[in-house]
């Protein structure tokens, strides 16, 4: 590997596996978040929930792969990264608040 870029297929595969399987957020999202939310739907709806998760995942990662090259010039600027980080932060806060509201026993005013 030179300058942090995988030069062989085995180096690239090893890097992908490390980023995927050693990443704690992967385990947090798939096991805790998706697993916990899916338990609400029961056995009857489990296949539909799994199919929906798989479809969303394939669509998301495919779009990232296809758009990465096209958006690379845009992300040469630091301001683009700040906007992206702000949007991601807003989505995370919204998701956390919805999970707390729906599954955490809090109503809209923070009262149990």
Image: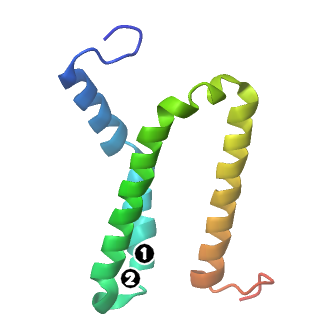
Whole-percent x, y for residue 22 in the image: 34, 41
Residue placed farthest to the top in the image?
2
Indicate the quadrant containing the N terminus: top left, top right, bottom left or bottom right.
top left
Query: Viewed as shown, does residue 55 lie left or right of 94?
Result: left
Tell me whether circle 1 and circle 2 mark residues in contact (CB < 8 Å): yes
- The residue that appears at 39% across and 47% down in the rendered structure is 62
Dot 2: few (<14), some (14–19), or many (≥20) neighbours within 10 Å?
few
Secondary structure of the residue carrying tag 2 is: loop
Q: Nearer the viewer, residue 90 or 24?
A: 90
Q: Nearer the viewer, residue 5 or 19?
A: 5
Q: Is residue 31 above or below residue 18?
A: below
The residue that disc 2 covers is 39
Query: Viewed as shown, does residue 90 lie left or right of 44?
Result: right
Whole-percent x, y for residue 9 in the image: 20, 23
Query: Viewed as shown, does residue 34 lie left or right of 11?
Result: right
Whole-percent x, y for residue 51 in the image: 31, 72
- Describe the colour scheme in one phrase: rainbow
- The residue that appears at 63% across and 58% down in the rendered structure is 92
- The residue that appears at 60% across and 81% down in the rendered structure is 104
Gap between marks 1 and 2, in whole Å?
5 Å
The residue that disc 1 covers is 36
User: Residue 71 has which mark?
Assistant: none
Whole-percent x, y for residue 66 in the image: 43, 40
């Amino acid at each position: 590997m030179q300058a942090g870029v995988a030069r062989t297929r085995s180096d690239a595969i090893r890097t992908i596996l490390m980023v995927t399987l050693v990443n704690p957020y992967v385990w947090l999202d798939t096991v805790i978040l998706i697993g916990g939310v899916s338990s609400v739907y029961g056995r009857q709806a489990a296949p539909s929930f799994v199919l929906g998760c798989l479809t969303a995942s394939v669509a998301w990662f495919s779009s990232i792969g296809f758009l990465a090259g096209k958006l690379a010039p845009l992300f040469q600027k630091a301001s683009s990264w700040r906007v992206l980080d702000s949007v991601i932060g807003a989505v995370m806060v919204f998701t956390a608040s919805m999970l707390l509201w729906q599954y955490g026993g809090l109503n809209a005013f923070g009262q149990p």
